[in-house]
Image (cartoon, rainbow, N blue to C red):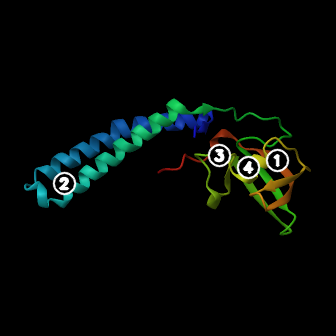
């Protein structure tokens, strides 16, 4: 699946790639050299751990570069009265008689523990583009759905955006 990224996401990914290439890679190579100097490599745990860390970093760099090559760039701009990416939304769940506040984000930033809801999730897909006061059906699967009412929409500034989750 092609990731949907905003310009801000692209910038953060590029910053991470640069940091990993210039800082982490250098430290990992030094750690491998130092561990190799300790002698017999077949029983050298430090050497194997250093190699594993180095390979993990290189794998992350390749993953991020591939993500950038295949990503679809989406706009995080939305009308002021409409739910869009990076908007903070207060939603009333009719079934539970409770409110929750979410921020709608791209899939790579999604983190339900921090109330960052992906535009690819059932609730994210359903409320995207709706206005305050709209009653929206959230279809979870073929047999279950529920309704929410959008109570409030706030624009979230670029500075409040969370970092991209690490894998």
Which residue in the protein does label 2 denote?
47
Q: Position of residue 26 (x, y in %)?
A: 28, 40
Residue at 71%, 50% in the rendered image: 103
Q: In the figure, is residue 38 to the left or right of 29?
A: left
Which one is closest to the eye, mark 1 or mark 2?
2
Residue at 61%, 32% in the rendered image: 72
Which one is closest to the eye, mark 2 or mark 4?
4
Instruction: Name the N-terminal-most of marks 4 and 1.
Output: 4
Instruction: Name the N-terminal-most of marks 1 and 3.
Output: 1
Circle 3 crowding by C-alpha within 10 Å: few under 14, some 14–19, many from 20: few
Which one is closest to the eye, mark 1 or mark 3?
1
- How many numbered badges does the structure rendering display? 4
> How much space separates mark 4 and mark 1, taking CA atoms?
13 Å
Which residue in the protein does label 4 denote?
124
Residue at 80%, 43% in the rendered image: 83
Which residue in the protein does label 1 denote?
153
Q: Residue furthest front?
A: 142
Residue at 83%, 61% in the rendered image: 146
Q: Position of residue 125 (x, y in %)?
A: 75, 47
């Amino acid at each position: 699946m092609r990731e949907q990224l905003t310009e801000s996401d692209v910038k953060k990914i590029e910053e991470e790639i640069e940091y990993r290439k210039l800082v982490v890679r250098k430290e990992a190579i030094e750690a491998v050299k130092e561990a190799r100097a300790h002698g017999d490599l077949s029983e050298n745990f430090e050497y194997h751990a250093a190699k594993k860390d180095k390979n993990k970093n290189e794998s992350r760099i390749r993953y991020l570069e591939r993500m950038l090559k295949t990503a679809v760039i989406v706009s995080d701009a939305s009308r002021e009265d409409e739910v869009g990416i990076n908007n903070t939304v207060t939603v009333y769940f009719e079934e539970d008689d409770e409110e929750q506040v979410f921020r709608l984000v791209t899939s790579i930033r999604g983190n339900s523990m921090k109330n960052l809801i992906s535009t690819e999730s059932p609730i994210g897909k359903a409320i995207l583009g709706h206005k305050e006061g709209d009653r929206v059906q959230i279809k979870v699967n073929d047999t279950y759905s529920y309704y929410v009412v959008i109570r409030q929409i706030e624009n979230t500034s670029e500075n409040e955006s969370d970092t991209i989750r690490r894998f």
